[in-house]
Image (cartoon, rainbow, N blue to C red):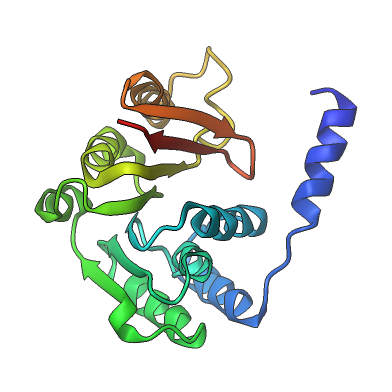
C-alpha cells in the first residue's frame, strides 16, 4: 500500500471516538468473546443511517449491540430495529446496550434464532436498511434475503466485505473468503442496485436499491 494512502487511512480511523455506552458494550463483548464492528465503522454506520433516513432496519447478527446502537442513533427517534442472533447471551448483552443508550424497548425487536429461518418470515420490501454481520457459512443466504427485504431507495450494508483482508488476495480460497467474494459479486451484479465497497475497518459493501 502507498504510504500516503496508509497514513490517511490510519488518520481517518483514529478520528473515531466512542462514549461510555459503547465502551461498556465492548467490555461485555470481550467477556463473551464477541468481535464487534470497529469504532470507525460504528461511526460510519451512524452517519449512514442518518443520511439514508432509515426508519425500519434489520440487523443480521446482533453481537453485543454495538452496531445496532450505532444504527439507531443515526436513524433517529422514530426508527425501529429488528435484530437477529442465535446466541441468547449476545442478545441479552445487546438489550443492555440498547437500554444504556436510552432506547425505548418498543424500538428494538431482538429475535433469538437462526437467521436463515427467521429472515424468510419478514415482509418483502418493508425495510429501509439491512445490515449483515453474521457467520460466513450462510452469507449468500443472508445476502439473498437482504435483497428481498430492502425497499426501493433502501440500503443493504455488508460488514467485513474483505473477509479479514483476504478477499483482495486471489490465491486465498478459504470457504469464508469465497463466500464473501460471491456475496460481493451478488450485490455488485444485481441490476436493481448500485453498489460500492468502502475501506472502513474490515470493509463495508454498500448497495442501494434503485429499482
Q: Residue at x 43, y 86 (%)?
A: 99
Q: Looking at the figure, which quarter contains the C terminus?
A: top left
Image quadrant assignment for residue 166:
top right
Residue lying at 33% horizontally and 77% vertically, measured from the top left: 107
Residue depicted at 34% across the width and 46% down the height: 135
Where is the N terminus found, in terms of image quarters?
A: top right
Q: Is residue 6 above or below residue 168?
A: below
Give coordinates of residue 64: x percent, y percent: 44, 69
In front of the other: 172 or 162: 162
Q: Where residue 94 sits in the image (x, y, percent)? A: 40, 74
* Residue at figure coordinates x 59%, y 74% from the top left: 22
**Quadrant of the rendered image containing residue 93:** bottom left
Tell me: residue 145, above or below residue 65: above
Name the side, left or right, on which 195 lies relative to 137: right
Query: Is 99 left, or right, of 139 in this rendering?
Result: right
Nearer to me, 34 or 132? 132
Location of residue 176 with respect to 99 vertically, above or below: above
Say which quarter of the image contains residue 27: bottom right
How many numbered discs? Answer: 0
Q: Position of residue 191 (x, y in %)?
A: 32, 20
At which x and y percent is residue 90?
A: 37, 70
Q: Is residue 190 left or right of residue 167?
A: left
Amino acid at each position: 500500500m502507498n504510504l500516503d494512502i496508509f497514513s490517511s487511512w490510519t488518520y481517518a480511523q483514529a478520528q473515531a471516538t466512542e462514549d461510555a455506552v459503547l465502551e461498556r458494550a465492548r467490555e461485555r463483548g470481550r467477556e463473551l468473546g464477541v468481535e464487534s464492528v470497529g469504532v470507525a465503522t460504528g461511526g460510519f454506520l451512524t452517519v449512514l443511517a442518518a443520511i439514508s433516513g432509515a426508519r425500519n432496519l434489520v440487523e443480521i447478527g446482533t453481537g453485543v449491540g454495538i452496531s445496532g446502537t450505532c444504527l439507531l442513533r443515526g436513524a433517529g427517534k422514530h426508527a425501529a430495529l429488528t435484530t437477529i442472533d442465535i446466541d441468547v447471551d449476545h442478545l441479552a448483552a445487546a438489550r443492555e446496550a440498547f437500554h444504556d443508550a436510552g432506547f425505548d424497548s418498543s424500538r428494538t425487536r431482538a429475535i433469538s434464532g437462526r437467521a436463515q429461518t427467521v429472515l424468510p418470515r419478514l415482509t418483502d420490501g418493508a425495510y429501509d436498511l439491512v445490515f449483515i454481520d453474521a457467520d460466513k457459512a450462510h452469507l449468500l443466504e443472508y445476502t439473498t434475503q437482504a435483497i428481498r427485504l430492502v425497499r426501493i431507495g433502501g440500503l443493504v450494508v455488508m460488514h467485513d466485505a474483505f473477509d479479514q483482508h483476504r478477499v483482495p488476495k486471489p490465491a486465498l480460497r478459504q470457504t469464508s473468503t469465497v463466500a464473501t467474494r460471491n456475496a460481493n459479486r451478488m450485490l455488485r451484479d444485481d441490476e436493481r442496485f448500485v453498489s460500492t465497497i468502502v475501506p472502513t475497518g474490515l470493509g463495508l459493501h454498500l448497495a442501494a436499491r434503485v429499482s
